[in-house]
Amino acid sequence: QVQLVESGGGLVQAGGSLNLSCAASGRTFSIYAMGWFRQAPGKEREFVAAISWYTRTTYYADSVKDRFTISRDNAKNTVYLQMNSLKPEDTAVYFCAARSSTPIALRPGASREEVYDSWGQGTQVTVSS
């Protein structure tokens, strides 16, 4: 089992930046991919970005491409989501997730919630206009 803890959320003005972190513990050697998802009030949870744990291959939702960057530090068992040029519509609870059962191809599998085995508790991001 992998445990995940997100941090770094907060309140920021439109155009600003935030850097989210997701620290993994437990059976981290079994991780194949990690992803970020978000859920805005009254909406379904949606895919944001994913990264292969070993190859650093990345995959982004069109809505965040060129503004967000996902990266990972294997030595720290941590995945980051650098969010720039934030918009009010980016306001949501952001969740990280880990896939640790079997390898998957990032596209399009990593955009589906059901492929992930472990989830964090989420961190709130609020972007004011």
Image (spheres, rainbow, N blue to C red):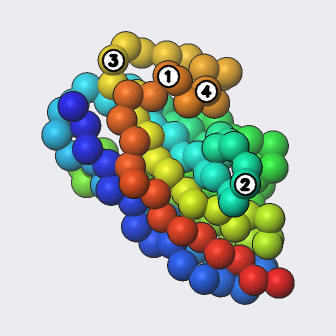
Whole-Å distance between the Cαs marked 2 and 3? 31 Å
Q: Residues within 10 Å of mark 4 (few under 14, many from 20)?
A: some
User: Outermost residue, front direction?
Assistant: 42
- In the rendered structure, the answer to whether residue 52 lies left or right of residue 45 reads left
Q: Residues within 10 Å of mark 2 (few under 14, many from 20)?
A: few
SS category of the residue bearing label 3: loop
Q: Amino acid at mark 2?
A: Gly
Where's the N terminus, which quadrant? top left
Q: Nearer the viewer, residue 74 or 86?
A: 86
- The tag on residue 115 is 1
CB-based contact (under 8 Å), mark 2 and mark 3: no
Q: State which mark lies toward you, 2 or 3.
A: 2
CB-based contact (under 8 Å), mark 1 and mark 4: yes
- In the rendered structure, the answer to whether residue 124 lies left or right of residue 66 reads left
Q: Which residue is the site of mark 4?
A: 112
Q: Amino acid at mark 3?
A: Ser
Whether residue 71 appears in this view of the structure is: no
- The tag on residue 54 is none
Where's the C terminus, which quadrant? bottom right
Q: State which mark lies toward you, 4 or 2.
A: 2
What residue lies at 73% left-to-right and 54% top-to-bottom? Answer: 42
- In the rendered structure, the answer to whether residue 116 lies left or right of residue 75 reads right
Q: Residues within 10 Å of mark 1 (few under 14, many from 20)?
A: some
Return the x and y of residue 125 as percentages of the image width and height: 59, 70
Give the mark nearest the N terminus, 1 or 2.
Answer: 2
Q: Which residue is the site of mark 2?
A: 42
What residue lies at 56% left-to-right and 30% top-to-bottom? Answer: 113
SS category of the residue bearing label 2: loop
Q: Nearer the viewer, residue 55 or 44?
A: 44
Give the mark nearest the N terminus, 3 or 4.
Answer: 3
Q: Nearer the viewer, residue 70 or 24?
A: 24
